[in-house]
Image: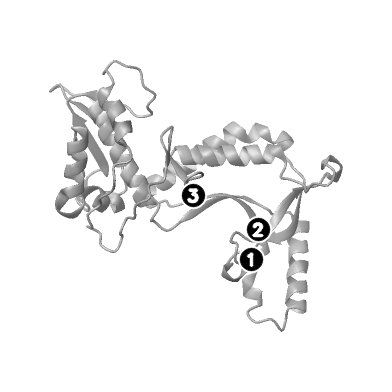
Amino acid sequence: DVLNPSTYWVGNRCYRVLTHHIDTASAYNTYVEEDEYADEVADFLGAGEDEEQNHEFSVDKLTNGLYRTAWHVPNVYYAYLIGRRGDTRRRLELETGSKISIPQRGAGVAEEVVVTGPTVPKVRAGRLKVELLVEQARRKQPLTHFVSIPIAAPHTQQRFLQFKEAVLEQCSTSIGVCEELFQHPARLHLTLGVMALVDETERKLAIQIFRDAVEANARDIPDGLLRLHLRGLHYFRDDPHSVKVLYAGLQACDASSWPEGSSPHLPQQLQNFADNVSNSMIKAG
């Protein structure tokens, strides 16, 4: 949908998803795409070295007069950055006027990609290009973790078990309806977001960012307590025949606050908390 495209964050900048396809069948498949960010890189190259810009990474000046930035990139993405016979890396260096150093996998060195160049804008442009490419490759990785709020109240678990028993009894003759379809009651939760964390460094960083985000936004929930109802069943896809997951709807308990003729919505305090935590983790990559 060109009017409502998918987006992702790199640092404090938001970009729409590229429309090309990354072929993961071969680890060293050449990565070629239309340069949809030429204007972005041109801004970097045209900016003065002393001009104030809003960047969340530092660029250091070396003793030889060059500039340098380095950051952690999981080694599973090295193949995407190098390309077949180094074509992708050479193209990025040519486009940005910087040199991109990628460590060899299994070399026992720190997994840091280093970008050097004669000016700060060229170094920043090189890093931006690399980060965009990594984000595209990350979207092809399987999801490994999720952030959630547990629903551990005993009465909620008890009602869930009653619901489970009723479904198994009333749908006992239906094909595929069995006990294995239901989640364990101790694992009921509200999902805030899902992630693909491919190494230990990313996992530790995600934990720290999550803790900071919770601490910064916990005040949005007064007394740390909200009374909610789980009611009804919903699914994500339009075609019921392709549904793999059913989830319960979340509603506020205070029915007197609902506008007449409208459905109850998720309390704004919890919605704000969930959005802020999720956005903090998205912006951190």
Tell me: 182 left or right of 44: right
Residue 112 place in picture, x, y as percent:
26, 41
Of the residues shown, which amino acid type is indicated by label 3? Asp
Residue 107's disc number: none
Is the residue under label 1 in contact with that under label 2 (CB below 8 Å)? yes
- Pointer 2 residue: 188
Q: Is mark 2 on a helix, strand or loop?
A: loop
Which residue is most to the top? 50
In the rendered image of this protein, does residue 175 appear above or below residue 198? Answer: below
Q: How many labels does the image show?
A: 3
Which residue is most to the bottom? 173
Nearest to viewer (mark 3 / mark 2): 3
Residue 183's disc number: 1
Question: Which class describes the residues within 10 Å of circle 3: few (<14), some (14-19), or many (20+)?
Answer: few
Residue drawn 64% across the image and 37% down it: 272
Tell me: 1 left or right of 34: right
- Pointer 3 residue: 1
Q: Nearer the viewer, residue 195 or 186?
A: 195
Q: What element carries label 3?
A: loop
Residue 221 place in picture, x, y as percent:
69, 36
In the rendered image of this protein, does residue 161 appear above or below residue 189? Answer: below
Residue 72 place in picture, x, y as percent:
31, 41
The reply to whether residue 115 is visible in this rendering is yes
Tell me: 159 left or right of 109: right
Residue 282 place in picture, x, y as percent:
48, 41
